[in-house]
Structures are given as structure tokens and as C-alpha cells.
């Protein structure tokens, strides 16, 4: 494929991902008229229209949507080729993209901080790591769409094309707000009887594991973020599970109360997830995985 054609593919990809000609100008550093001319050249070479543009806005045609997926696959393959060719030459890229669940870094059991530090040290400070926090439901999809190369999170839903490996266990405890009626019950038997009828907030990525037996009328909300769940617990009459390390400062300040922490707890598996056809340098990925395994506790469960 000629260089000019690759350039046109880059223009097309940038326009699609920006959502139109105008918004792609900053990315491509050219004016809208130039982008329009380049897109016309591309369509001329393809022999069909890939997008509609005008007052009604930018929209891909049916063929344009298929062509965009082909273009994405092409650039991923080209990136993989360049990385593997470089590794044959002895070049090792320290670039990769890491996505992880919010509020895990503060967990003493989480080896991520130490792993990043060790990895950057081994790369002599040259490693370029892109870090992004995702909602748990987004992590699998971000891997499949090649937005990230490696994910750390809680994966109850496991997808084909992704490899999973256990990393550590996160301790979750049930909490309520100070002043909540359950906070004043000292008898464990009475507390156990009262919890099923209490209003609850549930984390969506954990699902029914948190409250396997409950009255559906007591479920106030299903939340994707830990902070959002905690806010509901702090602001109202709900109880719910949150990570013990996250709850600790709020418990210390007297804002939250742990309910029977030696009985009402969940050990939630935090795992590593990697796309099986990842285009990132395998040596880079393996080196970082080695840093994670070396920094973390002995794996407590299999993937």
C-alpha cells in the first residue's frame, strides 16, 4: 500500500474518532477544506462513499462502518508488525496502556504501585505508561476495543479472547452511617435478623454476590463506583459493602460503622486481564506482569 494511501487512512480514522471534519482539525493540524479534499480522494480510490457530511452532521455509511473496523484492524496489525520487527532487532518498547478499577491503589494488598516503580526502574525511567481509571463494567470492553493493553479489576464476567489471572483478594465489609438504626444493635443475632429488611445499595459489578437473599423492595440503588455507593450510604438509610481499606478512614472518623466485620465480609478476587491478541510488545507486557507478580502476595485463587 502506498504511503499516500496510508496517510488517507489516518485521516479517515481521525475524522471518525473525532466525530466529524471540524473536530478532526486539531488532531490532524490541517483545515477542514484539506480534510474534505483528502476524504474525497479516499472515497475516489475506494469507489464508494464512507460518510455523509453536511448540515445534518457527520455520519458513517454502512460501508463506512465496516471500512472503519478494517482500518482499525490494519493499524493494529501494523503496530504489532513494527513492535515484533523491533524486538527481532533487540529493541524493547516500554510503552503500554494500563486500565484499573478506582480506589484499589490505597489497598495495602494491591501491588500496583510497587510494580510500576519496579518496572520504571528496570526501564531506566524510559517507560511510557498510560494510566486510566475505568468503571468495572468498562474494563473488558476497553481491552477488546484496544483502548488498553492490560486491566486490573474484578471480573465476574469473563469474555473469550481475554486471559485472566488472579492477583490478590480484596476484603469488603458491610457498613452503615453513624446513627443508622443498625449501628446501635449490639447483639449479633438481632443484627442478622434486621439486615435483610434494611435498605441496601449494591455495586453493579459484584451483583447478587453481595446480597444473595434479600427483599427486592429493599434495594435502593445499583452503583458502578465505590464512591457513589459510599455517598448513598453516608447520606441516607442504606447499608452496603465497600472495600475495608476504603472504609477505614471513614470508620476512624466515626462517619461509618462496620457491621459484624468478622462475619459480614466478602473476599473479592482482583485479577489481571490481558487481550490474547494484544499488539503491545510481548517483552514489555511480560516484564510488567513479572513486576506485578513479584510485588504482589502469593496468588490466593486461580484466575
Image: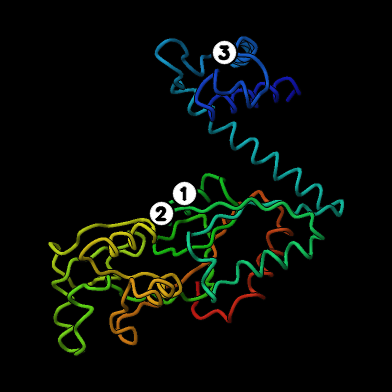
Looking at the image, is 145 positioned above or below residue 154?
Answer: above
Q: Is 217 left, or right, of 236 in this rendering?
A: left
Q: CA distance from mark 2 to mark 1?
A: 8 Å
Quadrant holding the N terminus: top right
- Residue pointed to by mark 3: 47
Instruction: Between residue 173 and residue 95, name the one nearer to us.
Output: 173
Picture coordinates of residue 132 (x, y %)? 56, 51
Q: CA distance from mark 3 to mark 1?
A: 33 Å
Q: CA distance from mark 3 to mark 2?
A: 39 Å
Residue depicted at x 70% and y 45%:
80
Bin the neighbour count of mark 1 within 10 Å (Cα to Cα): few under 14, some 14-19, many 20 and up: few
The numbered mark, 3 or 2, whose residue comes first in the sequence reads 3
The reply to whether the C-beta atoms of the residues labelled 2 and 1 are less than 8 Å apart is yes
Give the mark toward the camera: 3 or 2: 2
Looking at the image, is 38 positioned above or below residue 219?
Answer: above
The reply to whether the C-beta atoms of the residues labelled 3 and 2 are less than 8 Å apart is no
Q: Is 117 left, or right, of 122 in this rendering?
A: left
- Residue pointed to by mark 1: 141
- Residue pointed to by mark 2: 137
Q: Which mark is residue 93?
A: none
Identity of the residue furthest to the front in this view: 253
Callout 1 secondary element? helix
Residue depicted at x 41% and y 54%:
137
Callout 2 secondary element? helix
Instruction: Between residue 80 and residue 54, name the one nearer to us.
Output: 54
Looking at the image, is 180 positioned above or below residue 187?
Answer: above
The numbered mark, 3 or 1, whose residue comes first in the sequence reads 3
Give the mark toward the camera: 3 or 1: 1
Bin the neighbour count of mark 2 within 10 Å (Cα to Cα): few under 14, some 14-19, many 20 and up: some
Q: Is 219 left, or right, of 114 in this rendering?
A: left
Amino acid at each position: 500500500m502506498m504511503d499516500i494511501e496510508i496517510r488517507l487512512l489516518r485521516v479517515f480514522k481521525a475524522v471518525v474518532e473525532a466525530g466529524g471534519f471540524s473536530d478532526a482539525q486539531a488532531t490532524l493540524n490541517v483545515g477542514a477544506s484539506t480534510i474534505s479534499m483528502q476524504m474525497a480522494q479516499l472515497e475516489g480510490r475506494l469507489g464508494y462513499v464512507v460518510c455523509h457530511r453536511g448540515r445534518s452532521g457527520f455520519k458513517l455509511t454502512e460501508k463506512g462502518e465496516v471500512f472503519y473496523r478494517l482500518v482499525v484492524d490494519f493499524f493494529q496489525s501494523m503496530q504489532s508488525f513494527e513492535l515484533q520487527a523491533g524486538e527481532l532487532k533487540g529493541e524493547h518498547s516500554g510503552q503500554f496502556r494500563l486500565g484499573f478499577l478506582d480506589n484499589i491503589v490505597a489497598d495495602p494488598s494491591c501491588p500496583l504501585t510497587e510494580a510500576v516503580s519496579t518496572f520504571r526502574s528496570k526501564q531506566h525511567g524510559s517507560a511510557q505508561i498510560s494510566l486510566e481509571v475505568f468503571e468495572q463494567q468498562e474494563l473488558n470492553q476497553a481491552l477488546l476495543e484496544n483502548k488498553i493493553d492490560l486491566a486490573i479489576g474484578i471480573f465476574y464476567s469473563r469474555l473469550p479472547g481475554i486471559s485472566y489471572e488472579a492477583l490478590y483478594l480484596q476484603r469488603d465489609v458491610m457498613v452503615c452511617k453513624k446513627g443508622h438504626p443498625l449501628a446501635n444493635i449490639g447483639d449479633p443475632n438481632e443484627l442478622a435478623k434486621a439486615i435483610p429488611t434494611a435498605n441496601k445499595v449494591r455495586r453493579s459489578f459484584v451483583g447478587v454476590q453481595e446480597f444473595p437473599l434479600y427483599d427486592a423492595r429493599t434495594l435502593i440503588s445499583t452503583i458502578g463506583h465505590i464512591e457513589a455507593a459510599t455517598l448513598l450510604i453516608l447520606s441516607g438509610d442504606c447499608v452496603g459493602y465497600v472495600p475495608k481499606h476504603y472504609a477505614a478512614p471513614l470508620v476512624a472518623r466515626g462517619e461509618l460503622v462496620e457491621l459484624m466485620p468478622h462475619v459480614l465480609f466478602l473476599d473479592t478476587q482482583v485479577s489481571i486481564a490481558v487481550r490474547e491478541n494484544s499488539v503491545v510488545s510481548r517483552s514489555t507486557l511480560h516484564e510488567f506482569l513479572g513486576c506485578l507478580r513479584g510485588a504482589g502476595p502469593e496468588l490466593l485463587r486461580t484466575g
